[in-house]
Amino acid sequence: MARKLTTGPFSDPELLILSSLAEGKKHGYAMMIDIRTFADVDLGPGTLYSAITRLVEMGWIEPCAATGRQRPYRLTPHGLRHLQTQLEKMRHLANLGLRRLREI
């Protein structure tokens, strides 16, 4: 089932979470704040934790030992490769679109 993006291509929850975790391990609330800061996207708790569950199931992130009530997550090597691939695809698309705009 496809999700409707509401704020553009950079609002994909999975990609935003992977990008946040590329900086290091974080728990859910820290990811929400980081994503709001670097992407200007507010992920609600339901969206965030549903996406975290999907990412864990795909093997792209994994939970770390809990620190108190908070459970941090980190990228797996497979998740890092996926993030790199997706960002390269986005770079290619952005370059193509910008090149075409210059031709107008």
Image: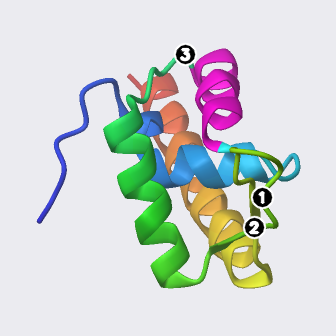
Q: Which residue is mark 1?
A: 66
Dividing the picture into quarters, in which one does residue 50 lie? Answer: bottom left
Q: Is residue 31 magenta?
A: yes
Q: Which residue is mark 3?
A: 40
How dense is the environment of label 1, judged by Cα within 10 Å: few (below 14), some, or many (20 and up)?
few
N-terminal of the pair, mark 2 or mark 1, is 1
Q: Magenta residues? A: 28-39
Q: Residue at x 54, y 52 (%)?
A: 15
N-terminal of the pair, mark 1 or mark 3, is 3
Q: Is residue 91 visible?
A: no
Report, in whole angstroms, how far the alpha carbon at label 2 lies from the one at label 3.
22 Å
Which secondary structure is most common in the magenta stretch? helix
Residue 39 point in image, percent of width and height? 59, 24
Q: Residue at x 62, y 75 (%)?
A: 60
Q: Amino acid at mark 3?
A: Asp
Q: Residue at x 67, y 74 (%)?
A: 79
Q: Is residue 12 magenta?
A: no
Check whether the beta carbons of the residues at disc 2 and disc 1 lie within 8 A of each other: no
Check whether the beta carbons of the residues at disc 1 and disc 3 lie within 8 A of each other: no
Q: Is residue 28 above or below residue 74?
A: above
Residue 32 point in image, percent of width and height? 58, 29
Q: Which residue is mark 2?
A: 75
